[in-house]
């Protein structure tokens, strides 16, 4: 190999390594541009009445995501932070504009009320229910809704703990079906339900609850046996 070719290969190697290092720490320009476009699409869909502009973003290598600043063109003082996944659908992970639209105090009050109502209903109709917790985020009543169909409350996220001592996966599945049917009868609007199964283990006077099974389902997707996961 001639000296000229050796120099060429060395230069190419340096360039490739340099590009790899830049891509590793800052991702690549095409991926960043794609993320910005996906964020603009998200903004146009969710905030059609707002004059929002995506500004330059930065790449966070540890979480493999981009963080963009979005400003309101009608009010330069209003700026928001959005985090979007790098690749894999470019999912929006964090939306501070959405977070600011919620009423924390009202959300907590509504969540407590719904938790108590569900606890009373499910504990009397579904066996082995120990605890029910519902989380609802309520929007501030002063915000401008983008359509008449948009609700002030988001669908609930429900967590249910059950006593599975001496019970099997099949028992958990049957309980999940009963919960699903009962929520449908009560016309509860929810995003997701997580049922965690606990078993009481240990010597007499030293028994403790151990988390052993979990199953999740959504309002429009009933529980399935294959969705049960074992934790021990």
Image (cartoon, rainbow, N blue to C red):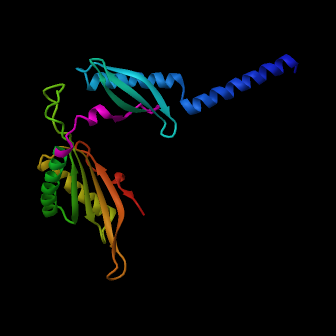
In the figure, 5 relative to 120: above or below? above
Quadrant of residue 25 within the rendered picture: top right
Residue at 26% over, 24% down: 47
Rendered residue at 14%/29% (across/down): 149
Q: Is residue 11 left or right of residue 163?
A: right
Decide: is 195 above or below 1.
below
Left or right placement of residue 163 versus residue 40 in this view? left
Residue 203 part of the magenta-drawn span? no
Give the quarter of the image for residue 2: top right
Task: Locate residue 10 relative to residue 21 in the image: left or right.
Answer: right
Outermost residue to the right: 2
Q: Is residue 122 left or right of residue 227?
A: left
Q: Is residue 92 magenta?
A: yes
* Percent coordinates x, y for residue 210 in the rendering: 36, 68
Furthest residue toward front: 77
Residue placed most toward the observer, 177 or 119: 119
Which image quadrant: the C terminus? bottom left
Q: Please provide percent x and percent y for residue 120.
A: 12, 60
Indicate the position of residue 159 as horizontal and vertical percent values.
26, 54
Rendered view: 206 above or below 63:
below
Residue depicted at 11% across the width and 49% down the height: 186
Q: Report the number of discs.
A: 0
Q: Quadrant of the N terminus?
A: top right
| Camera-side residue of 118 and 187 | 118
Magenta span of residues: 85-105
Residue lying furthest bottom in this view? Answer: 204
- Residue 68: percent from the left, percent from the top? 41, 28
């Amino acid at each position: 190999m001639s000296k000229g070719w050796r120099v060429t290969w060395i230069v190419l190697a340096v360039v490739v390594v340099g590009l790899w290092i830049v891509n590793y720490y800052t991702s690549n320009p095409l991926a960043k541009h794609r993320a910005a476009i996906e964020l603009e699409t998200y903004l146009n869909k969710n905030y059609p009445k707002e004059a929002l502009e995506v500004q330059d973003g930065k790449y966070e290598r540890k979480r493999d995501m981009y963080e963009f600043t979005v400003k309101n063109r009608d009010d330069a003082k209003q700026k928001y932070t959005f985090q979007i996944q790098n690749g894999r659908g470019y999912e929006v992970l964090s939306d501070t504009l959405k977070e600011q639209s919620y009423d924390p105090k009202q959300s907590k009050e509504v969540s407590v009320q719904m938790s108590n109502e569900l606890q009373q209903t499910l504990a009397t109709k579904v066996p082995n229910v120990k605890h029910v917790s519902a989380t609802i985020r309520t929007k501030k009543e002063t915000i401008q809704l983008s359509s008449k169909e948009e609700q002030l409350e988001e669908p609930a996220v429900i967590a249910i703990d059950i006593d599975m001592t001496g019970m099997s996966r099949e028992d958990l599945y049957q309980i999940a079906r009963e919960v699903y049917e009962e929520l449908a009868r009560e016309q509860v609007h929810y995003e997701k339900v997580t049922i965690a199964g606990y078993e009481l283990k240990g010597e007499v006077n030293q028994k403790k609850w151990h988390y052993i099974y979990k199953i999740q389902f959504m309002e429009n997707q009933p529980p399935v046996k294959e969705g049960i996961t074992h934790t021990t």
